[in-house]
Image (cartoon, rainbow, N blue to C red):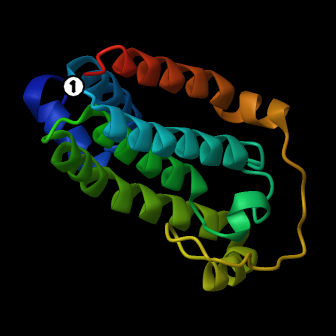
Amino acid sequence: MAITFGLQRFLHDIRYHRERFRQFLGIAFVILVSTAGEPKKMLLATGGGLVVLGIAVRLWASGHIKKNKVLATDGPYTYVRHPLYVGNITLGFGFALASALWWSLPLLVGILVAFYPHAIRREDERLHRMFNKEWEQWRKGTRALIPRLISYQFTQRGNWSFRQSLRQNGEPIIALFLLFWLYFLSLGLH
């Protein structure tokens, strides 16, 4: 029997196709904590700094991606295999902190635990199939989410490209979206 609608389909998709919901839940989280937030000056400043740092990491990473063509091992990819996820996690914690909502941190952790291990595993498997030995070598010296303090040396060197960042992910547009919600959150400063 094919699962085509309702709760059964939703549960099926969460179990087998959860990547469909990761971005939606991330956006919903940002909007929720930004509209419900009760920011305090110090928490907003600290959280806002984390949001800006997360955006910067995402912009840096997206300008080095060569999706499905070349294994990105330059830029932030010399420090960590999944810098876009590191940026997401950093800015997520920033929004949770800036909102000063006690429940935002457990909610964020729940979202991260539900989606990121699965996403990392699938992406690593896909990259391994595509780039085999090159990926294996890169993986040996580069952790998934915890950046190295010193870049791992690879032969590939590229330059960051704004055009690449915009074309691959629409990253500058995402950055503006996130900054808008951070500003919106700051309007509720107590």
Q: Badge 1: how crowded within 10 Å, few (<14), some, or many (20+)?
A: many
Dot 1: element? loop
Quadrant of the rendered image containing residue 138: bottom right
Quadrant of the rendered image containing residue 184: top left
Label 1 sits on what residue type? Answer: Glu
> Residue 154, percent across and down?
83, 76
Who's the residue at 53% across and 45% down the image? 54
> Residue 68, percent across and down?
72, 50
Residue 14 seen in the current view: yes
Q: Give the camera-side residue of 4 and 170.
A: 170
Q: Residue beneath label 1, please?
A: 38
* Image position of 185 (left or right of 166): left
Q: Quadrant of the C terminus?
A: top left
Quadrant of the rendered image containing residue 20: top left
> Residue 136, percent across and down?
66, 81
Q: Is residue 162 above or below residue 131?
A: above
Who's the residue at 64% across and 77% down the image? 149
Q: Give the camera-side residue of 42 and 138.
A: 42
Who's the residue at 53% across and 49% down the image? 87
All told, the count of numbered labels is 1
> Residue 69, percent across and down?
79, 52
Residue 2 seen in the current view: no
Q: Is residue 6 above or below residue 12?
A: above
Who's the residue at 17% across and 49% down the image? 106
* Image position of 166 (left or right of 5): right
